[in-house]
Image (cartoon, grey):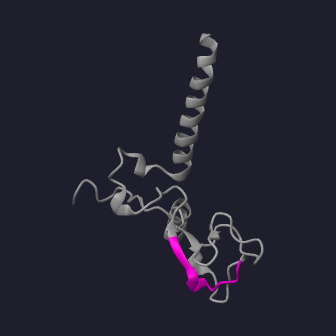
Amino acid sequence: MSEHENEPVLDITSDVDESAESAETVQTTELDRYECRSCGYVYEPQKGDDKRDIPPGRPFDELSLTWRCPVCGAKKAAFISIGPASSASGFKENLGYGLGVNTLTPTQKNLLIFGGLAVAFLLFMSLYGLQ
């Protein structure tokens, strides 16, 4: 007989449901936005569609085939994926060029452009103080 034969066996398996874990990973990933090629409307899953009673968080793939663009009425097939909201704009093959500026999101590009214009304007106006 071994020394460990009379010791109680501990069950260290967790009672965590695997489907709950997969639901958490789905919620943490960013969902792709889709743009209507006809009018430019962007379906954002985080916002949903109030006009058609689509709740926030519903992916574009789960919309019914009868769903239409709320602006122009185009069919679901007229939409193309433009990626998540935080992704850099532009073609993926061009993101390596431009001194790193091509990897910026549209919001970051706007801040860079308009911030630069504001600094240039303030510098220009400060020249009047030299007189």
Where's the N terminus, which quadrant? bottom left
Residue drawn at the location 55% of the way across and 30% of the way down: 120
Residue drawn at the location 63% of the way across and 13% of the way down: 129
Where's the C terminus, which quadrant? top right
Q: Name the foreground residue: 44 vs 93.
A: 93
Against 31, residue 67 (above or below) is below
Quarter holding residue 47: bottom right
Question: Bounds of the magenta span?
Answer: 72-81
Q: Is residue 23 magenta?
A: no
Left or right of residue 79, residue 74 in this image:
right
- Percent position (x, y) of residue 28? 53, 59
Quarter holding residue 38: bottom right
| Residue 34 is at least partly visible in this image | yes
- Percent position (x, y) of residue 78? 57, 82
Q: Tell which residue pokes out farthest to the left in this image.
A: 1
Residue drawn at the location 29% of the way across and 59% of the way down: 5
Q: Name the foreground residue: 53 vs 3.
A: 53
Against 48, residue 114 (above or below) is above
- Percent position (x, y) of residue 90? 44, 60
